[in-house]
Amino acid sequence: MKNGKNPMWEAYQKEIANDHYYFARSCIRQNFFPAAEDLYLKILRDELGKDIYDDARQTSCTGIAYHSGIIPMETTMTVVARQFALMNEAGYENFVCSCVTSFGIYAEILETWKHFPEKEKQTREALKRATGMTFEIPKNLVHASDLVYKFREEIAAKAKFKLINKQTGEPLKVVDHIGCHYAKIFPKEGIGGAEFPYVLAGMIDEWGGAQVDYPERRHCCGFGFRQYLLKSNRGYSVSNSKKKFDSMEPFHPDLIIANCPGCTFFLDRWQYVISEMDGKTYGENGYGIPVLTYEELAGLLLGYNPWSMGLQLHQVAVEPLLNKLGIEYNPDEKYKGVNGLDLGKPELPNTLKCC
Amino acid sequence: MIKHIEALKQDVRFVEGLKSCINCGVCTAICPAAQFYNYDPRMIADTVQKGNEAEIEQLLKSDTIWFCGECLSCKTRCPRGNTPGYIIQALRALSIETGFFIESKQGQKQLAIKRTVGEHILKYGYCVYIDEVNTEMYPEQGPVWDWLKQNRQEVLERLGTSYQKNQSGTLRQIPEESPNDLRRIFDETGATERFEKIETQSALKANEMGMNKNEYFDYLYNDNKEPER
């Protein structure tokens, strides 16, 4: 597959600055994978020697509220403009965001300002009136995974593990889930475009795994913004994830890696829900298919302790993956607090096997 | 009052979203919402393209415009450069602006989103915050979330976060100037006005249905059925 589609992927390379970024955090990733963003910063700074600025004053881009229809486009544009102003104040010109929804929001606003210059003018005036701030548009806008992709060879060179099953010597079968707003809105903004996004596939290839090309590979995880946010509409969300799980199941994936914080969360938690509702599990021996973010995968391969990376906060147990990779871990440390404080253990699900 | 179609044409998302629909149905074929709900984005594009005021008003009062999940898969696929997802954004904005959102159950639910995500942004600087998420409202979070919530100080410290601390980092206590800036931006750009419109119209509807503020929220957030009286 790689040889056949590579020429098309290569036609879709985007600009990714080499260094010096202002980092914008994600609403979802901070809460549901609370060690992931600091792990990302650690990899960028300590492993790759990059300069990346983490500002206490930054905020949400408001994308979830915007796509749910509760705030106007003008509000989101002005909040984004404030983020750019903070980036300027900190002395940076390159902007990296840790969320695919945010990446889509930033890309869409920059594109809107090109098509409708009066909107940029109105935004500048609104920001000035509201905060006194002014801003310059970033020279380079990237998603956090773009940088991991760009430096995937450097990470591979430092890695202690490869995406190889230690017992069989075979490449692990890895599902990549890109997240709709990474490239479906503006294909030119994503590595590989919308049809053959290579941002995560490039990591899988470089780190020794095998891509899983299943029928619903490009289908939405089912977030649906207002559809998930309301319990009464949430069936939409789980149904769309189930469609993907059912489609990937015959390929027996060892791992799912996801680009977007929301997608990572849904692909993890909906496996738990489906197991509770239907008694159905998608991994081996009653387990689920482990779901990781790209920085969590990079961290594991670099040899970081899985419990320092917060992998105990995934509802689908990661141990089957750790065992295949040959990563040694102490199961007794999994649910400990600072200095080994005993915090008990989460209750076990009824069906989904957890460690 | 200006015509609905004229109001839509003032929204850049409508201008970008509707070029020239040929009714091919590719958007519907790719649409996750069309696979789950009785929803057809092709019909939305067709209705607004025809420009019939009565039909557009019917859309503004309907559940239909609230079924889209904004994945924007339609943008990639449309052979004529239309984006039904953008048309939906413009219709939803107009539905709230005109007050028609209150005519449909799905439209009414905007209140529950305003009360959660909308208010979280102004309180915490982010759409989501750990302290507001529990397994009663979000049961899919699972037992691991209950464990995290019960032990959040210890777990979040072990993971090196900035939970409730006045410093940069994950889950920090955001400096006061940031939500203050956001509030002024919301005032300046129409979000505050939209929030007030959602609250005012919802209060009238709740009153009409004989529910108090919390009962109405529960009715919208939790259940598709009206409570028995």
Image (cartoon, rainbow, N blue to C red):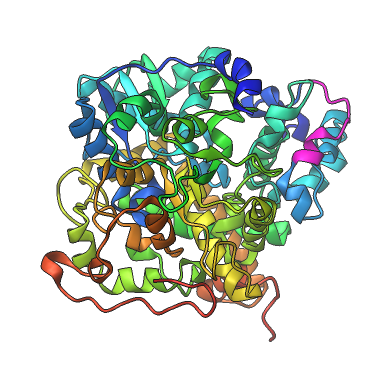
Relative to residue B149, is residue A10 drawn left or right?
right
**Residue that protrudes farthest toward the left in the picture:** A339
The residue that appears at 28% across and 57% down in the rendered structure is A328
Image x and y of residue B80, in percent = 79, 20
Rendered view: A260 above or below A92: below
- Residue B111: x and y in percent read 55, 59
Q: State the image coordinates of residue A201 (x, y, percent, origin top left).
A: 52, 33
Q: Is residue A137 visible?
A: no
The residues colored magenta run B20-30
Name the one closer to the observer, A317 or B209.
A317
Q: The N terminus of chain B is located in which quarter?
A: top right
Residue B36 x %, y %: 75, 55
Instruction: Name the outermost residue toward the bottom.
Output: B229
Q: How many marks?
A: 0
Q: Is residue A246 left or right of residue B217?
A: right
Residue drawn 57% across the image and 29% down it: A197
Residue at image point 46% right, 63% down: A316
**Quadrant (top left, top right, bottom left, bottom right) of the C terminus of chain B:** bottom right
State whether residue B60 appears in this view. Answer: yes
Residue B29 forms part of the magenta stretch:
yes
Q: Nearer the viewer, residue A68 or A320?
A: A320
Rendered view: B188 above or below B205: above
Q: Is residue B206 magenta?
A: no
